[in-house]
Amino acid sequence: MYTYEYERIYVEGFISLKTKRYEEVITRRAEDGWRYAGFLPIVWTNGALTEIDLIFEKEV
């Protein structure tokens, strides 16, 4: 069985999307024993993706 946690990442730009700190978040979570499992688009504003949740899992 696994437990899951989510961490919100904010996206900037319209044509060229830029995310801040996702690499840092994934590395920090991995050091704490979490595995990156994927992402979900959360907020779209005027047709542009503005927020995503990174999904992490850990075996319990």
Image (spheres, rainbow, N blue to C red):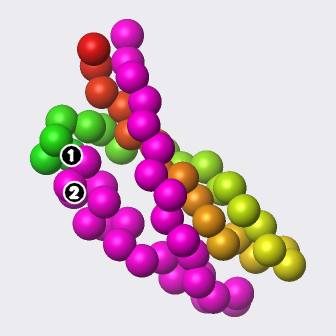
Residue 53 at x, y percent in the picture? 54, 53
Q: Which residue is mark 1?
A: 30
Tell me which amino acid carries mark 1: Ala
Q: Residues within 10 Å of mark 2 (few under 14, many from 20)?
A: few
Q: Which residue lies under the disc numbered 2?
A: 27
Residue found 49% across the figure and 64% down from its top: 9
Which quadrant of the structure image shows residue 48?
Answer: bottom right
| Helix, strand or loop for disc 1 | helix
Q: Are marks 1 and 2 in contact (CB under 8 Å)?
A: yes
Question: Which residue is the extreme one toward the left?
Answer: 31
Q: Which residue is at the far top?
A: 1
Residue 21 against residue 27 in the figure, above or below: below
Q: Which residues are magenta?
A: 1-29
> Image quadrant for the N terminus?
top left
- Relative to the observer, which residue lies in front, 40 or 8? 8
Secondary element at image label 2: helix
**Residue under the image location 86 percent in, 78 percent down:** 46
Name the kind of residue labelled 2 in the image: Thr
Q: Is residue 6 located in the magenta-colored stretch of the structure?
A: yes
Residue 27 at x, y percent in the picture: 22, 57
Q: Which quarter of the picture shows residue 4? A: top left
